[in-house]
């Protein structure tokens, strides 16, 4: 809803949490590139379908290539599973570095979505292994 009104990803309450998370590592939206898997919100805020993800994936990969980030963070299960071509859920994927084939020079790390943290009212400890 907030994203639709403002035309930006990760705004509203979950966006505020994301801003705090970025600030804790010395970052803000001015020095990060943030995008969604789909350029639209699916009806009823449902999970994107496989067909929607397949249609948008080449554009998203190109966004990543053009942005040329030093670090990739795949926020949430949908992005992590889709971009890493994995079937495990975010709780198993998060906190580890992975190979990312398109471009090869970036090592992404999956993370919990701030919306999940807000919805559950829980703060999950960072679980990063090298």
Image (cartoon, helix red, strand yellow):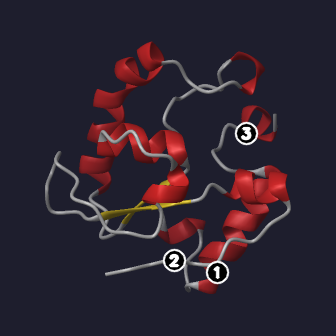
Say the numbered circle drawn on residue 23. 1
Q: Is residue 111 above or below residue 82?
A: below
Side (left or right) of 104 relative to 82: left
Of labels 1 and 2, earlier in sequence is 1
SS for callout 1: helix
Say the numbered circle drawn on residue 127. 2
In three-dimensional space, the C-alpha distance between marks 1 and 2, rounded to whole angstroms, equals 18 Å
Side (left or right) of 65 relative to 24: left
Quarter of the figure with residue 20? bottom right
Q: Residue at x 56, y 24 (%)?
A: 48
Give the camera-side residue of 43 and 23.
43
Circles 1 and 2, Cβ within 8 Å, touching? The answer is: no
Say the numbered circle drawn on residue 3. 3
In three-dimensional space, the C-alpha distance between marks 3 and 1, rounded to whole angstroms, equals 20 Å
Of labels 2 and 3, earlier in sequence is 3
Give the quarter of the figure containing the N terminus. top right
SS for callout 3: helix
Circles 3 and 1, Cβ within 8 Å, touching? The answer is: no
Q: Residue at x 17, y 45 (%)?
A: 102
Residue 106 spot, x, y in % from top left: 23, 63
Residue 94 spot, x, y in % from top left: 47, 62
Of labels 3 and 1, earlier in sequence is 3
Dot 1 alpha-carbon crowd within 10 angstroms: few under 14, some 14 to 19, many 20 or more: few
Quarter of the figure with residue 17? bottom right
Q: Residue at x 57, y 78 (%)?
A: 126
Dot 3 alpha-carbon crowd within 10 angstroms: few under 14, some 14 to 19, many 20 or more: some
Give the camera-side residue of 116 and 22.
116
* Residue 11 visible to the viewer: yes
* Residue 13 visible to the viewer: no
């Amino acid at each position: 809803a907030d994203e639709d009104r403002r035309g930006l990803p990760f705004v509203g309450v979950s966006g505020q949490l994301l801003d705090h998370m970025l600030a804790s590592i010395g970052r803000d939206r001015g020095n990060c590139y943030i995008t969604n898997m789909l350029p639209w919100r699916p009806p009823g805020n449902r999970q994107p379908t496989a067909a929607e993800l397949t249609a948008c994936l080449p554009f998203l990969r190109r966004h990543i290539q053009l942005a040329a980030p030093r670090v990739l963070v795949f926020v949430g299960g949908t992005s992590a599973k889709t971009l890493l071509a994995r079937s495990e859920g975010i709780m198993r994927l998060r906190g580890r570095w992975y190979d990312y084939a398109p471009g090869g020079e970036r090592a992404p790390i999956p993370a919990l979505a701030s919306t999940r943290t807000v919805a559950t009212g829980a703060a999950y400890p960072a679980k990063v292994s090298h």
